[in-house]
Amino acid sequence: MTRQWHPHPTANGRWTRRFYILCLLSLSGCLSGVTVAKKSTSTTAATIESPYAQDLNDWVRARCNNDNDNDIALWVYQGALVDPLEGRKIANVQGLEIVRCIANVGTTTSPQDSKRLYQQQCGDLQVAKLIGQANATFDRVSTILSRKLFCYQPPDGPPQLQQQQPNTNNTNQELLRQIKLRPNAPKRYIPIQQSIAVYDTATTFIARGAQLIAHTEWPDRQSIWGMVTRTATTTTTPTTNADDQTTTKSFEFTIFARLKSLKTKPEELFDLTTTVPPTDDSNNSQVDAAVSSPKRSKLIEFGTGSSRSKDKFGARETYSYTNIPASGSLAPPTRRGWWGRPKTATTTTPPQVRYSRYGEGPPFVGPGRTCTLELQGKRVSSVDDLPPFLANVVAERLSPRFLTSVMNTSSSSSELPQWFRQSERLLQIQPDDDNEKARLLPEQWRDRGQKAWHQVRQRVSTLFG
């Protein structure tokens, strides 16, 4: 006779009842979770951003460190300025950039509220009127203030080594102060105001379906604009924990920038009232074909001459960002844990960028001469992470408020644009000495003038001696 197990009428009975109650509660929670999820899907389906707008949002968050309170990030760069025709390195380059997001507005709630919010935050910028048009449509608009510092340094190594790819491991601690553009050409002296470049910009990106527009302006209201071709890819990488994975995104875009006349308004360049381009992947090729690369003859026709037209391009810039944390609709589905937490780990590697610019070079290479600037950059945590050379340049050559003014300015709707318009006074470069202007003359002119002045002094001393 088999003995059957019966729970104890007191202790085991209470345990059994508790077990059944827990099972019922768990089942009820799962069913209620399914119900809530269905409600959430039905109520928010109309407000989900397009993948292209989500791309822009993820990139802005990575570029400006949107996880902090002030939306401020610091980037450092290193690379080289190269002659594209000869492949010769002209100079090494180090740089830093402070970026601050002043507007990152989507239209998932109310388009009119989004327009009103953007105008409150960026009312003094040129694109604010464009965004505020009654019939204007867009998915997301983002504006980033940027303060850049670039330092040109002598190319390292003998000439035969300078034919290779730019060396990004630059350990030179000097500024480029003279240059020979050709082997037989005389040395040209470079003033400190040309070996160091500092400037502020406000760049606005407008996402409309599969279309992306870029508009950059300077404090003096000079601006460039262009259509953007871009690609975005999402990568999922397993971590040391088998249950976790890291989801990151790469975002690459190219801008063919045109110089906009001061008399031309942004609304005369962009039409945000037309039909939004298609957003499905099947039509990507049609949109990209409409934003085709210009002919090389047009690309290199730029400068300060009177023959400039709206069809001539000022520069081609390519940005390739990596290690961007993916979010929103583009993040791949992940397995959920026991308590409903997604098994996705955030990336610990800071965002990085490869930057390439083909266009007119700095003043010391001559007017209208094209150069290629190749840089690698990464986002750093604080000013303490700056390379020693850049830290010394900031301390010795620039205003003490060069860095702090960007960080300390209030993020209110009116102060940031006003600060941007008045920021040029903080970009003055301290010269070497009182003779800096005299050294701008060509070497032979300066030597000839000094010799003549010496002869005059001898004659004067003879007459009055």
Image (tube, grey):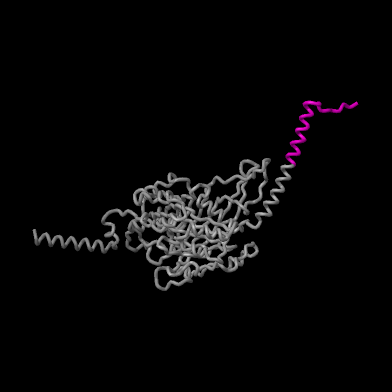
Q: Position of residue 275 (x, y in %)?
A: 60, 68
Decide: is 11 above or below 379: above
Relative to 245, say whether 278 is above or below: below
Range of residues picked out in magenta: 1-27
Residue at the far bottom in the pictured view: 307
Image side of residue 136 versus residue 149, left or right: right
Residue 174 visible somewhere in the drawing: yes
Q: Of residues 311 and 279, which is closer to you in this image?
A: 279
Q: Main secondary structure of the magenta part?
A: helix
Quarter residue 362 falls in: bottom left
Image spot of residue 276 (x, y percent): 60, 66
**Residue 346 at x, y percent in the picture:** 58, 46
Residue 343 position (above or below residue 191): above
Please tell me which residue lies in front, 77 or 125.
Answer: 125
Q: Residue at x 24, y 61 (%)?
A: 447
Furthest residue in direction right, as rendered: 1
**The C terminus is located in which quarter?**
bottom left
- Residue 160 appears anywhere in the view: no
Figure quadrant of residue 260? bottom left
Q: Measured along the vertical axis of the image, is residue 98 above or below residue 239?
A: below
On screen, residue 44 versus residue 367, left or right, reads: right
Q: Position of residue 322 (x, y in %)?
A: 54, 52
On the rendered image, what quadrant is the N terminus found in?
Answer: top right
